[in-house]
Amino acid sequence: LLIGCPAATEWHENRVAVTPEVVGRLGRAGLDVVVEAGAGQEAGFPDETYVASGARIAERPEVFAQADILAVIHRPDFRRLRPGQIVIGLLRPDDAPEELADVTALSFEGLPRTLSRAQSMDVLTSQANVAGYKAAVLAADTFGGFFPMMMTAAGTVRPAKVLVLGGGVAGLQAMGTARRLGALVTGYDVREAAQTDIASTGAAVLDLGVSASGEGGYARALTAEEEAVQQRAMVDAIRGFDVVITTAQVPGHRPPELVSAQALAGMAAGSVVVDLGAGPLGGNVAGSVPDGRTVTENGVVVLGAGDLPAQVARAASSAWARNVTALLEYLIHDGSVVLDPDDEITAGLLVHPKETVS
Ligand code: NAD
């Protein structure tokens, strides 16, 4: 069996789905590895590091034509795919699924994340963890003051006050990282279970009087009334924070707007807001621009940062490659990929479930 790893071609995408570190493990699972020339370059894995690990380097058409399995970050150009090929990545299964009808598409969006045996395969978690870390570091770098308290001969500087909205994987990592940098951290989420998680990072817990636990461990979308209550309470709560990091998501919905223009208007000049939800559908912060930096009239810096894992490409790729390898080790039996539609993990991943043994 041959696994192919083409280069990601999306704007700003520096990650690669297979790294040299996993080539040996893939080999032991029965897979030869072919990587597109230059695919790992931006993530810090030049071609020679793949060759030294036992992989082959090839040009793009050859990778697509020869591979039995393609490991990708995002959905590749479907016209290049060969019928019967297995494609593994974040494939946006709800967006024109017919494009993927001729291939066996395994999309990480469908992984049953709460199953403990699926956790080693969970790219959503591994990438959210990278995003949360980078959000805190980016905020510290952009903020004009210190995160920790500083006692110097010229006097004492108070620590930065950081508010993290959303206490899922990215939010908890942002809280932990900001605390390790010495900031005074407060966390907020609408899910009840998240309150204990936030407290376990050592952050203070903010309550705005809205509770919204939903299905499968996720939050549910707020009603218009709840959203209005939350936004109004946020206007008062957000004052006095130097840094706000927003990470709130609701699966299948546009990111909730937690920080309104009015809330931004109440913040002090020089405050920094990092919006991890910023994307084409909007974000958690009014007026945030995907991949853009804006400054409000009152001097608040708003960073739209929906693509942070791609900016920490080495760590993000290493984690991704380990997730893909864990999945393949799970699926390969006696040299074949076995896709049992009765298996919960396989059924979740398959974009077009059908009985397939390749
Ligand atoms: P996510 O990226 O979908 O959302 C991030 C956070 O935003 C969530 O905590 C959510 O509650 C919060 N949120 C949504 N709407 C909000 C609003 N209006 N106001 C404030 N916060 C809001 O979530 P995620 O990080 O992928 O995971 C969510 C949960 O699932 C977490 O508890 C996570 O630990 C859990 N999870 C569990 C497993 C597992 O059991 N193995 C794996 C992955 C995730």
Image (cartoon, rainbow, N blue to C red):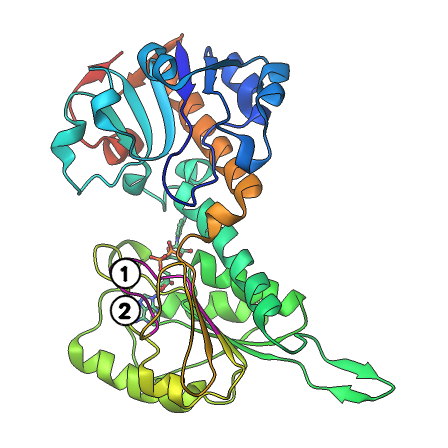
Q: Residue 338 occupies which quadrant of the picture?
A: top left
Residue 46 or 177: which is nearer the viewer? Answer: 46
The residue to which callout 1 is attached is 250
Residue at the spot 40% in from the left edge and 82% down from the top edge: 207
**Quarter of the C terminus within the rendering:** top left
Q: Residues within 10 Å of mark 1 (few under 14, many from 20)?
A: some
Q: Is mark 2 within 8 Å of ligand 1?
A: yes
Q: Secondary structure at mark 1?
A: loop
Q: Is mark 1 within 8 Å of ligand 1?
A: yes
Residue 324 or 310: which is nearer the viewer? Answer: 310
Please check the rendered image and state whether residue 104 is part of the magenta-colored stretch, yes or no.
no
Residue at the spot 40% in from the left edge and 86% down from the top edge: 297
* 265 vs 292: above or below: below
Q: Secondary structure at mark 2?
A: loop
Q: Residues within 10 Å of mark 2 (few under 14, many from 20)?
A: some
Q: Is residue 267 left or right of residue 203?
A: left
Estimate the x, y position of residue 154 in percent, counting from the top left.
84, 88
Whole-number angstrom distance, CA of label 2 to CA of label 1 = 7 Å
Of mark 2 and mark 1, the one earlier in the sequence is 1
Say if residue 209 shows up in the picture.
no
Q: Is residue 266 left or right of residue 154?
A: left
Cβ atoms at labels 2 and 1 below 8 Å apart? yes
Query: Of the residues shown, which amino acid type is indicated by label 1?
Result: Val
The residue to which callout 2 is attached is 256
In the image, the segment drawn in magenta is: 273-285
